[in-house]
């Protein structure tokens, strides 16, 4: 049996994820390089996704086709409490699925195992949510 059809199917939509400042990269990949559509994206303790500027990453949502996961650190949510609501509204308006959740007991940088604020149970939970997203959206 040839794997070519499976590889072609897999190559039709890609996935992207990012930590902290790298979170906006999937946004820009989706809109600046639409030749390979991104089917799923994830943000782990990302910040600066909703700003007052005309170049705010959340304003790119209507141009996307990707499903997203936003795993927000508790202290990031405290610093930008309205961001999650703006993201929810923006994805809903665009008709795109997005899982947006504040992970209790976490601090910015909580996902990588080598981080000094690593939170293993919540990081594992976020990782499992990412795998579920990739399973269904890519």
Image (cartoon, helix red, strand yellow):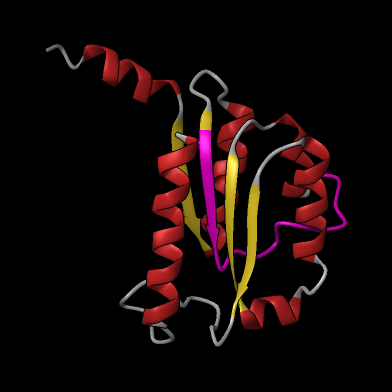
How many discs appear?
0
Does the magenta portion include 46?
Answer: yes
Percent across and percent down for residue 82 are: 83, 68
User: Does 121 sit above or below residue 131?
Assistant: below
Q: Residue at x 45, y 77 (%)?
A: 122
Q: Residue at x 28, y 20 (%)?
A: 7
> Residue 118: which quarter of the image?
bottom left
Residue 111 makes an appearance in the image: no
In the displayed structure, does residue 54 sit left or right of residue 119?
A: right
Q: Specify start and end residues of the magenta stretch as a single range.
A: 39-54
User: Does 87 sit above or below residue 125?
Assistant: above
Q: Nearer the viewer, residue 91 or 27?
A: 91
Residue furthest out toward the left: 1
In the displayed structure, does residue 101 sit left or right of residue 90?
A: left
Q: Nearer the viewer, residue 40 or 117?
A: 40
Q: Main secondary structure of the magenta part?
A: loop
User: Does 39 sit above or below residue 34?
Assistant: below
Percent across and percent down for residue 137 are: 49, 37
Q: Nearer the viewer, residue 56 or 81?
A: 81
Q: Residue at x 48, y 47 (%)?
A: 133
**Quarter occupied by the N terminus:** top left
In the displayed structure, does residue 40 sit left or right of residue 62?
A: left
Percent across and percent down for residue 99 are: 62, 55
Residue 108 makes an appearance in the image: yes
**Quarter occupied by the C terminus:** top left
Q: Residue at x 48, y 55 (%)?
A: 18
Percent across and percent down for residue 33 are: 55, 25
Q: Nearer the viewer, residue 55 or 113?
A: 113
Does the magenta portion include 40?
Answer: yes
> Residue 74: which quarter of the image?
bottom right
In the displayed structure, does residue 49 sit left or right of residue 117?
A: right
């Amino acid at each position: 049996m040839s794997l070519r059809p499976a590889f072609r199917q897999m190559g039709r939509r890609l996935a992207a994820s990012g930590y902290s400042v790298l979170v906006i990269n999937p946004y820009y990949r989706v809109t600046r390089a639409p030749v390979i559509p991104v089917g799923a994206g994830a943000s782990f303790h990302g910040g600066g996704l909703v700003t007052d500027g005309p170049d705010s990453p959340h304003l790119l949502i209507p141009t996307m086709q990707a499903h997203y996961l936003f795993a927000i650190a508790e202290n990031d949510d405290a610093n930008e409490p309205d961001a999650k609501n703006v993201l929810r509204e923006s994805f809903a308006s665009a008709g795109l699925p997005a899982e947006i959740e504040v992970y209790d007991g976490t601090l910015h940088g909580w996902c990588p195992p080598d981080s000094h604020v690593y939170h293993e149970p919540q990081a594992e939970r976020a990782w499992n949510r990412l795998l579920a997203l990739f399973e269904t959206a890519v």
